[in-house]
Image (spheres, helix red, strand yellow):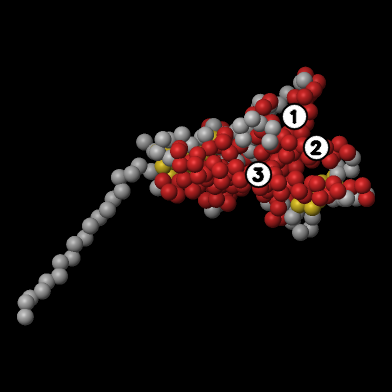
Amino acid sequence: MKIAPTLEGGLRIDPETPDDWHILRAIVLDANGHETDLATRLGGMVTDERVAEDWQDFVVPDLRESFADDLNQIQAAIETAAAFANDGESPIWIKHEDALPWYSALNQARLALEEKYAFGPDPESDPSNLQPVRNEALLRSQFYCALQSFLLRHAL
Amino acid sequence: MPKTTTLIRTETDISTQPPWNVIVHDDPVNLMAYVTYVLMKIFSYNEKYATQLMLQVHQQGLSIVWSGELEKAEFYVQQLQLHQLKTSLEAAE
C-alpha cells in the first residue's frame, strides 16, 4: 500500500494487494468490535448527578450518531474504491474536508483495540512474544496510528 | 399637578454557583499532536498554551483545560468527547 499527500491538502491511498483492502476494511470492523460502544464509554466519564442523566439522554445519542456517520462515510469511500479495484489502479482519495471523519474512524478502531487488548503506551517490542490474534491486532493498530500521523501532518 | 420623583434602584446579582472544570484525561491512544490540535480548535488557544495543557495531560494524567459556568462547560465537554478525548466535567471545590 502506498500513501501520499496530495497538492490539494489531502491524502491518496493506493491499495496494491488483497491484504491492503483487508486491513482497510478492518478499520470499521475494529471500531465496532467492542461490546460497549465509544459513545457510552465516553459518556460514562460524566458522573456528576446534576448532569449525568441529561448527558446520557441527550449527548450520548448525538455522540453515537456522529461516530457512526464517520464510520459509514469511510466505509463507503473504501467500498466505492474497491468496486473498481479489479480494473487496475483504484486509489482512495481523502480530501481535506474528509480528513476528520477518517481520523475519527481510525481513532475509534484504535480505542476499541486498546480497550480489548490493553497494549498500553509501549506495546511489546518483540511481536513474536504475542499471541497471533493479539499480534495482528497490534499491527493493525500501528498501521492505523501511522495513517493518523499522515492525516495530522498533511490533511487536518 | 402632583410632583413625581424617579427612584433608581441598582441591584447586583452575583452568582454563587461554583465554577465547573472541564478535565481531559490521558489515554494511550490519542496522539499528542492531535490533543494539541483539538484544544486549539475548540478553545482557540494558541499553540504554546495548548501544548502546555497537552503535556500536563500526558505527564500528570489529566489537566483542567477550562473552568467556568455550567452551560459552557457542558458544551466544551461535548465537543471534546466528539473528538474522542476522554473528558469529564466536575464542579470545582
Q: Hey, what amino acid is under mark 2?
A: Ile
Q: Is residue B84 shown above or below A126? A: below
Mark sitting on residue A23: 2
Mark sitting on residue A138: 1
Q: CA distance from mark 1 to mark 3?
A: 23 Å
In the image, B79 versus A35, the foreground residue is: A35
Neighbourhood count class around disc 3 (C-alpha, 10 Å): few under 14, some 14–19, many 20 upward: some
Which chain is home to disc 2? A
Specify the farthest residue to the bottom.
Answer: B1
Q: Which residue is mark 3?
A: A68
Q: Residue at x 77, y 49 (%)?
A: A77
> If the image is split into quadrants, where does the N terminus of chain A sit?
top right
**Which type of secondary structure does the marked residue at label 3 adopt?**
helix
**Which type of secondary structure does the marked residue at label 2 adopt?**
helix
Q: Position of residue B62 (x, y in %)?
A: 52, 35
Confirm whether residue A130 shows in the render.
yes
Dot 2 or dot 1: first in sequence order is: 2
Q: Hey, what amino acid is under mark 3?
A: Ala
Dot 1 or dot 3: first in sequence order is: 3
Q: Is residue B14 left or right of residue A41?
A: left
